[in-house]
Amino acid sequence: QVQLVESGGGLVQSGESLRLSCAGSGTTFSVMGWYRQAPGKERELVATITSRAGTEYAGSVKDRFTISRDNARNMVYLQMNSLKPEDTAVYYCYARGYRQSYWGQGTQVTVSS
């Protein structure tokens, strides 16, 4: 059974930092990453990373967030610095396996002004 389990969300003030973690199990993943969904909005890409450490970022987070990955442990991380109220959303871990893609249950990130 493939699982993705996120941790690290919470409530912070504008300008502060948070680190999200996602533990994958059940298979290996070619791509891992993070998406987010704010109330009333569609789910959007935040960042992805391949097994060879190739990365992609949304323009709105590129200079503030850093994605990293531990292939041996099937973990992906998102270091979020200089958080803004508009970063408030449910953050979902994403992973692409051999035959299909998977999602975590989501973790809430709330940034107060």
Image (spheres, grey):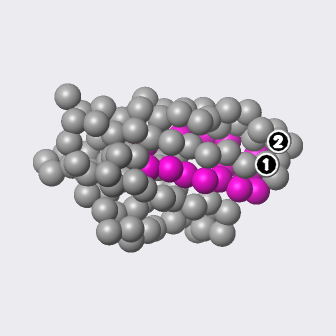
Residue 17, position as x, y percentages in the image: 73, 49
Considering depth in this image, is 28 or 9 the residue closer to the camera? Answer: 28
Q: Is residue 60 visible?
A: no
Vertical position of residue 39 compared to residue 50: above or below = above
Please state the horizontal and vertical placement of residue 86, each as a whole percent of the image.
Answer: 71, 49
Q: Are marks 1 and 2 in contact (CB under 8 Å)?
A: yes
Q: Which residue is mark 1?
A: 16
- Left/right placement of residue 8 relative to residue 51 reads right
Q: Nearer the viewer, residue 4 or 36?
A: 4
Measured Cα–Cα span from mark 1 to mark 2: 6 Å
- Reply yes or no: does residue 71 show up in magenta: no
Segment colored magenta = 76-93
Q: Is residue 86 placed above or below 89 in the rendered structure?
A: below
Q: Quadrant of residue 5?
A: top left
Q: Amino acid at mark 1?
A: Glu
Q: Image point 22% across, 36% down: which residue?
A: 26
Q: Residues within 10 Å of mark 1 (few under 14, many from 20)?
A: some
Specify whether 7 is left or right of 87. Answer: left
- What residue is shown with label 2? 13
